[in-house]
Amino acid sequence: MDRKISLEATQHIAELVNLTLTQEELEKLSIMLSDTLDYVEVLEELDTAKTPPTFQVTGLENVFQTEKNHICFTQDAALANAKETKDGKFVTEAVFDR
């Protein structure tokens, strides 16, 4: 199999996104990423010279929220079922190792 992305590069990518992979998973991911690049190469063969750049496909332009008062929870109602609160906010466990 001709891999476009080496196992070392795949390991580096996994480390960047904080994934711990087994050797088998690492090899599978390397193949999947290489296959993805193969598909991109096929797309690069298409003649897109007459195709305008597209960054928004729904046709919506300048859509803003209306200035209406919406029915919403009070802070007390929003926090009513929280296991723990502090200073009017939810308390959760830390998600970062800092």
Image (cartoon, rainbow, N blue to C red):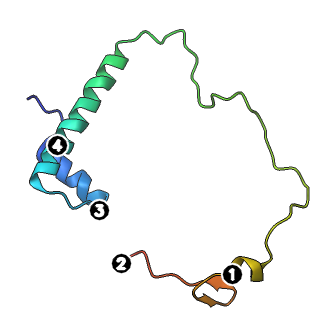
Q: Earlier in the sequence, mark 4 or mark 2?
A: 4
Could you tell whether 81 is left or right of 49 in the image?
A: right
Counting the numbered discs, the total is 4
Q: Amino acid at mark 4?
A: Lys
**Which residue, given by chain and number where applicable, does mark 1 sit on?**
79
Which mark is nearer the camera, 4 or 2?
A: 4
Q: Which residue is mark 2?
A: 97
Question: Tags 1 and 2 in contact by the CB under 8 Å rule?
Answer: no
Mark 3 or 2 closer to N-term? 3
Distance in Å between CA atoms under marks 4 and 2: 28 Å
Whole-number angstrom distance, CA of label 4 to CA of label 3? 17 Å
Asked whether disc 1 touches disc 3, contact meaning CB atoms under 8 Å apart, the reply is no
- Between marks 1 and 2, how big is the CA–CA gap? 26 Å
Q: Amino acid at mark 1?
A: Leu
Badge 3 marks a residue whose secondary structure is: loop
Measured in 3D between alpha carbons, the distance from the residue under mark 4 to the one under mark 1, in whole angstroms, is: 44 Å
**Residue 92, horizontal then vertical, whole percent:** 51, 81
Q: What's the mark number on residue 18? A: 3
Quarter in which the N terminus is drawn: top left
Q: Which residue is located at x 29 percent, y 62 percent?
A: 18
Report the Cα–Cα distance between label 1 and label 3. Answer: 32 Å
Residue 55 at least partly seen: yes
